[in-house]
Image (tube, rainbow, N blue to C red):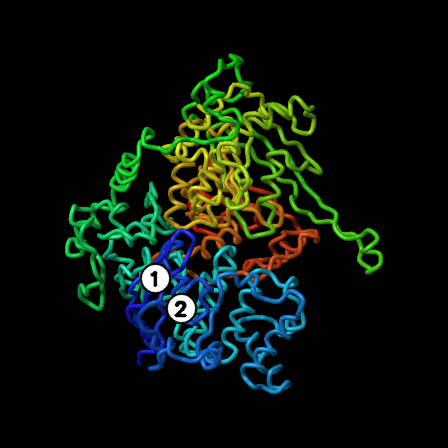
Amino acid sequence: MTILSIRDLSVNYATQDGTVQAVDGVSLDLEEGQRLGLIGESGCGKTTLLKAIVQVLPRNGRIVGGKILFKGMDLLQLPAAEMRQLRWREIATIPQASMDSLNPVQRVGSQLTKLLRVRGGFSKKAALKRAADLFDLVGLDTERLMHYPHEFSGGMKQRAVIAMALALEPSLLIADEPVTALDVIVQHQILEVLRELEQELNLTVMLITHDISVVAQVCDSVSVMYAGRIVEQAAAEPFFSSPAHPYSLGLQQAFPNLARPRDVLVSIEGYPPDLREPPSGCRFAERCPFVQDACHDIDPTLEAIGDGRAAACLRSNEMDDLRIQSEDPSLWQRVEVAQRSLQSPSESPPIAMEGDLDARLATTASVETPPSPSQWEGGMGGVVTDAPLLELQNVSKRFKIGGGLAGLLRGDKEQTVYAVNNISFSIKRGESLGLAGESGCGKSTTGKLLVKLIDASDGDIIFDGADLAAMDDDSLLAFRSRVQLMFQNPFEALNPRFTLYRSLTEPLIIHGWKDEHKRLDRVIETLDRVNLRPAEVFLDKYPHQLSGGQLQRVVLARALVLHPDFLVADEPVSMLDVSVRAGILNTTRRLARELGLATVYISHDLSLLQYTCDRIAIMYLGEIVEIGPSEQVINNPQHPYTMALIAAVPVPDPTIENPPLRIQEGVPRPTEQFIGCPFAQRCPDAMEACLTVRPPLIGDENEHGAQCHLYGEHRDSPKLKRA
């Protein structure tokens, strides 16, 4: 039975710059019990399609054509009151910002029972019982009904929102990015909940995401959207084994695969077309490595290609050969080169900057040499030397919370947060180290310690022979020029009132660059290095004029403009689309190797760290529980927590099922100190000794070590013997 049928749906947005055709002639069917994954980059129209289905478009959005049939009813013809009755009862949604979807001043149980009573007509007693049943269904303790949202972890909030969506037993559940920004372990647990609910309740699900690995693990069919249109439809297994559209090929090859790692991730260079004036031909033509002249003139329609599949490509009958060609990353890089040639610097618009920059640059420049102790100028060439650039020796960081007058009035005692506990490691020039772990494990705190944004409570941090704790003002200024931090959120990392030129020259000015000619040359050189070309086009732009991927490249450029020796990247691609993410990772890895840049990547996703890092350190409750070469840590993990992190990473292949997590949910509070192993409470292999004896960090000849009593026994490896 077809539960949802969309025919030739078109949605426009009225803007000051013209009408945007956000959804253009989309047609798809959803059968009862089907789990459809709708994938594509940001801005391709996925969320607009959801809002059109449930009739919650913003004021400037308008459906200009098509039909949306739900169980035979045309939703576009329903009165507003009837449509309102359908929401929650028949069509429920899990919103994209589900972490913020709960009222912070109401208990979660009150919000759920209110929905049941107002929309479902439940009595108070029946609503309380139904709420408890729903919490039990999604794996939440019923006592949590009396708690406020701030007392829930991210995964618990997500489960609560899922419970609300299922409250009235809807026929269709639409989930918009339900696991975005969650830790991989929490993400795995949420996906397990969705899978169990699908089987138990025979749910019909539309899952909207840009994460193809999530679709591979949850969905049985896939639709791919690009520039407001569906460009491919297929069952999940044939889609992942043999995609039939070049855009689908690019998305799959841009995604890191822990099971089958690639040497190079594909970056789909460029951006979708401006939908205020869509191109007359194929909308993917400018980014396609297989483009032909006809692609610029003929607009392909979605046509059946056999076995219930459809694709909108003029060369769909050649896809067997094209898939083989697409395995060569240089094929996609040639598209990047071709795009750059479309606009040369001479064709760029004139640069208008504060204080008439051109006039200032025409004056005689001073000839002072900018202070830069960096090693870039000599050209380290990505060589890893034996001497460590940075060393941490038994470093700890503690924070005090609570107490004070307010705490005294509430009866709260002062507590100590043990954020980082006695960690030690070193980083060589040109080496990259990944820090992995769940939220709250101490990764970001460690990153701040490395760049001296905060000071250590105990231990020593030595940078190039100098103790950070003993630095005077002059030494600290020189240190700041050699060490940089790349922030997690590109949308908040730049001053919105500054042009990009001003943002990028500010570090140079702070560190004594008085010659504006040299500042401009350095900025242009750095923008070019991070693949923002032609650089001159970007100088007078403001952050809001750039895409997320462009913004992250600017943040990277600002970190590199002083030619530092050491870079800390804190979740640098967590908020970006998969194709944009691949481009940022490729650029960062290339620059680190070319410039001899020592880097620390902070992430919860081991598939990203496997691709970018020479070594990986696993953190849990402020301690390093395993460290070693990336390949060894991924392929031969020696700590149960590392095994859980690996098992939690979804693989973009529906034929490979993620193993069940063998650990208990929830990370203990970092205000607690443990006599034995800090992971013992969640460890499936815990012994009595684990509760009373702290295991040492035991290593082997390959510098692969783990803090576990069962070191060498978790995997049957001849190289790893229990010490």
Local crowd size for mark 1, using a 10 Å CA cut-off: few (<14), some (14–19), many (≥20): many
State the image quarter where residue 101 is shown.
bottom right
x, y percent for residue 233: 27, 64
Q: Regarding mark 2 in the picture, which secondary structure is present there?
A: helix
2 with respect to 634 (left or right): left
x, y percent for residue 198: 42, 73
Q: What's the mark number on residue 52?
A: 2
The C terminus lies in quadrant? top right
State the image quarter where residue 286 is shown.
top left
Q: What's the mark number on residue 23?
A: 1
Residue at horizontal 43 percent and vertical 40 percent from the top: 612
Nearer to us in this view, 477 or 264: 477
Nearer to us in this view, 177 or 624: 177
* 336 relative to 86, above or below: above
Query: Is there a contact, CB below 8 Å, between mark 1 and mark 2?
Result: yes
Residue at horizontal 47 percent and vertical 50 percent from the top: 575
Name the amino acid type tagged 2: Ala
Q: Earlier in the sequence, mark 1 or mark 2?
A: 1
x, y percent for residue 646: 46, 53
